[in-house]
């Protein structure tokens, strides 16, 4: 901080004091006083200059401060304007998105409505060995669920059961099944029996599960737009009544735990010069256009025959070996291996998707059957279990107390209601 120089009066008093104390002459004292005045003048001038500079610096600082404040104000306003514009853009985008979603929903609903109002003829194809009575109760409950599903079908839709067997099965007569094939799209839903099938099972090819695939390849199915290949330990639901996907659909399998199984299947695909997999663990249930399903079934049979002859040792195929190969390489799931290789190749142009939500959905679930098109009893003892049913564990169930909007109860009801009255 600048200090003010002493005044003239102060200097004169100092001079008088010096004259008295030092005893010098008045002339010398005057010289000292003049010199002091000059020095005081110089100090004052310097102080004035410094003060002026300080004032200028303060003014400049104040100016700069104001400019900075104005700049900050402008930047703040610009920021606020940007936020405002961003909010407006966001609102516009949200509006556009909402319109797109609404438009998409309208288009989807329109497409679905157009599909539902059109004619669509389907067949659920199953293989029922005439000598295996243990499968009859399963076919009965599948048949019962098919009856229940029909109440929800659109007017122009038809769904037949085509049950292929290798002999006479009296139960099929009890269920009003017929040997008359479908002739017209307007014919009512029916259970159609093809009893002229010859099983592939033989000493050279002792694999019983191949027939469930082969019946699709050799049975005339030209009356149908789409075909469902399914096991009998399954149930159709109200959701199946209106379900027509845009792609070939398969359910969930459990044969490939990766590792050596995956490597062997990949190697077989390369060896046969077929298409690399896009879906894995292909289930036993297939749903797609009839001609394509039949092509896949034929290719699957070719693959199964090849694999049985070339990919398993005599020991691995022997009854004594049993399930020792599971889960790495097991001849007991040969049809699943064949489906894995075939489906990935034959659907390469049409497209395929695995939909475990709508096919092979477990009967142990408590979700609504209106949300899942096809239910499958898995290899466990949880309710609803095909093993527990076969053992009579559900004989005391009260059908009237079952909740048909619960999958486990739905399956239980269809199974119980389908059996012959005692």
Image (spheres, grey):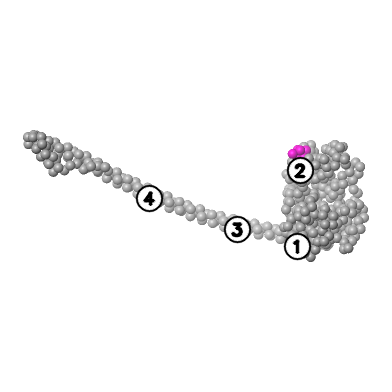
Q: Which label sits on residue 99?
A: 3
Q: Secondary structure at mark 2?
A: loop
Q: Residue furthest right?
A: 168
In this rendering, the label closer to the viewer, 2 or 3 = 2
Residue identified by numbered label 4:
70
Whole-percent x, y for residue 279 in the image: 73, 45
Residue identified by numbered label 1:
403
Q: In terms of sequence position, does the residue under pointer 3 or pointer 1 come before the other?
A: 3
Q: Is residue 326 left or right of residue 10?
A: right
Segment colored magenta: 259-266
Mark 2 touching mark 3, by CB under 8 A?
no
In this rendering, the label closer to the viewer, 4 or 3 = 4
Residue placed most toward the observer, 54 or 162: 54
Q: Residues within 10 Å of mark 4 (few under 14, many from 20)?
A: few
The residue sitting at 91% across, 56% down in the picture is 169
- Residue 402 position by quadrant: bottom right
């Amino acid at each position: 901080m600048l200090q003010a120089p002493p005044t003239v009066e102060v200097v004169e008093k100092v001079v008088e004091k010096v004259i008295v104390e030092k005893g010098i002459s008045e002339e010398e004292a005057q010289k000292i006083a003049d010199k002091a005045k000059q020095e005081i003048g110089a100090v004052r001038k310097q102080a004035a200059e410094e003060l002026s500079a300080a004032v200028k610096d303060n003014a400049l600082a104040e100016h700069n401060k104001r400019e900075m404040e104005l700049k900050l104000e402008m930047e703040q306003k610009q920021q606020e304007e940007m936020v405002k514009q961003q909010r407006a853009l966001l609102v516009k985008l949200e509006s556009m998105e909402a319109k797109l979603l609404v438009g998409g929903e309208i288009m989807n609903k329109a497409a679905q409505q157009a599909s539902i109002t059109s004619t669509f003829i389907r067949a659920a194809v199953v293989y029922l060995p005439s000598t295996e009575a243990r499968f009859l109760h399963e076919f009965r409950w599948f048949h019962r669920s098919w009856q229940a599903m029909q109440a929800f079908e659109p007017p122009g839709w038809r769904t037949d059961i085509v049950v292929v067997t290798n002999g006479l099965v009296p139960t099929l007569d009890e269920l009003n099944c017929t040997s008359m094939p479908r002739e017209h799209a307007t014919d009512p839903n029916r259970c159609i029996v093809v009893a002229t099938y010859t099983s592939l099972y033989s000493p050279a090819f002792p694999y019983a599960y191949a027939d469930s695939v082969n019946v699709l390849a050799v049975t005339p199915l030209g009356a149908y737009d789409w075909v469902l290949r399914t096991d009998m330990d399954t149930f159709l639901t109200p959701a199946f009544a209106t379900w027509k996907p845009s792609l070939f659909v398969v359910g969930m399998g459990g044969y490939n735990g990766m590792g050596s199984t995956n490597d062997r299947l990949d190697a077989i695909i390369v060896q046969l010069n077929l298409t690399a997999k896009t879906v894995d663990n292909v289930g036993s249930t297939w749903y797609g256009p009839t001609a394509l399903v039949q092509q896949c079934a034929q290719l699957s049979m070719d693959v199964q025959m090849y694999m049985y002859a070339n990919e398993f040792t005599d020991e691995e195929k022997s009854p004594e070996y049993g399930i020792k190969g599971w889960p790495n390489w097991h001849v007991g799931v040969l049809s699943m291996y064949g489906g894995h290789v075939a489906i990935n190749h034959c659907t390469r142009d049409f497209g395929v998707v695995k939909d475990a939500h709508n096919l092979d959905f477990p009967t142990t679930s408590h979700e609504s059957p209106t949300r899942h098109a096809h239910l499958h009893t898995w290899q466990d003892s949880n309710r609803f279990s095909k093993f527990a049913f076969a053992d009579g564990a559900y004989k005391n169930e009260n059908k009237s107390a079952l909740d048909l909007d619960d999958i486990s109860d739905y399956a239980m009801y269809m199974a119980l209601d389908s059996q012959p009255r005692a």
